[in-house]
Amino acid sequence: MSGIQPEIAEKVRQLEEKFRNSGQDLGSYLDGLLYDKYLTYWDYMELDTLLSLQKPKTHFPDEEIFIGYHQITELYFKLVLHELKQLVEAKDLSADFLTEKLNRIIRYFRIQTNSFDVMIRGMEREQFLKFRMALLPASGFQSAQFRMIEIHATPLYNLVNHADRESLRSNLNLDEVYQNIYWKRGGISSDTGEKTLTLRQFEEKYDEVFLRLAQNLEGKTLFELYKALPEEERNNKKLIEALRNLDVAVNVNWLLVHIGAAQRYLMVKKNAVKATGGTNWKEFLPPSFQRISFFPELWSEEEKEEWGKQWVEEMITQ
């Protein structure tokens, strides 16, 4: 390899060893590299495809904002699940590694919460109230990725409405616990007491997926991974702070910004307009009504009793 810089020759030697160990021929890979086109940003990002996915159902301009923001939200949920899956698969979990992943997840939720002004103030109210009628019965309630985040975070009994939680805590029938998960109540029509089409569609598509995920995560949810750490690591202050911050980010702040949007768009002279899924959002969204906490043992009884109550009361009574 005369004339080739030593560092380049060393890289070629390393590549040759790599492909020899995999049973492949380095020369063939070099041919592929030689013939390959230069990578462009737009190809790598699949930009043309990405920008073609916003397909409004009506002629109202602000519907594109609504679609785009929700698609961005789902991409952030995908990143959250990416971090959670790494934690589940980690062989030697440490407090430092867990804290780092938690802070990444908190960051994703903080970005979404801070940017929710796009939804609260970024659309004309009259446009929203009209184009939303073309979206029935679709609803953000049907975000499967958000439900998967919840299932990754904590055992199913912590996702049961607080009034039924204790009675199901020791229930070994995971299917029965799942059927009492809090958000299913949110899919009950406040007029008829029957399941809405929104809920029936969601159950048909995802019930088996969610239940299988919960079964696969038994003993490996985020809360259980934390409790399995050695005592010294469990008492790590930064880790405990990160767990508490995540709980608030998802189960208080994320709900409150949705209430802010609902207040702006769905309140007419102090009467609530129903959400597209047919549910009464004033009963379903407030965190103090559901009292869902991923990590209940990290909160005092007083904190759990007052869960999100102060902020919700301030917002709903405005």
Image (cartoon, grey):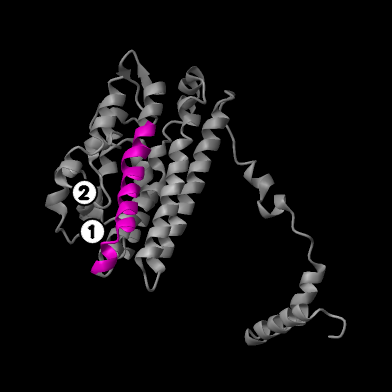
Give the Cα separation between the discs numbered 2 and 1.
25 Å
Q: How many marks?
A: 2
Neighbour class for label 1 at 10 Å: few (<14), some, many (≥20)?
some
Name the residue rendered at 41%, 44% in the picture. 143
From the top left corner, tell me how far across and down residue 36 is, in percent.
78, 66
- The single residue placed furthest to the left in the displayed view is 167
- Residue 84 shown left or right of residue 23 in the figure: left
From the top left corner, tell me how far across and down residue 244 is, in percent.
30, 49
The kind of residue tagged 2 is Trp
Question: Of the residues tagged 2 and 1, which is closer to the observer?
Answer: 2
Dot 2 falls on a residue whose secondary structure is loop
- Name the residue nearer the viewer: 177 or 312: 312
From the top left corner, tell me how far across and down residue 311 is, in percent.
29, 31
Q: From the viewer's perspective, is residue 79 above or below residue 125?
A: below
Q: From the viewer's perspective, is residue 151 above or below residue 132?
A: below
Q: From the viewer's perspective, is residue 245 above or below residue 11?
A: above
Q: Which residue is mark 1?
A: 174
From the top left corner, tell me how far across and down residue 300 is, in percent.
17, 47
- Judge whether residue 277 can be spotted in this image: no
Q: Which residues are magenta?
A: 231-258
Q: Which residue is mark 2?
A: 299
Specify whether residue 70 is painted magenta. Answer: no
Type of secondary structure dominating the magenta stretch: helix
Q: Quadrant of the N terminus?
A: bottom right
- Name the residue nearer the viewer: 237 or 185: 237
Specify whether residue 233 is painted magenta. Answer: yes
Q: Are marks 2 and 1 in contact (CB under 8 Å)?
A: no
Q: Quadrant of the C terminus?
A: top left
Figure quadrant of residue 4: bottom right
Neighbour class for label 2 at 10 Å: few (<14), some, many (≥20)?
few
The kind of residue tagged 1 is Leu
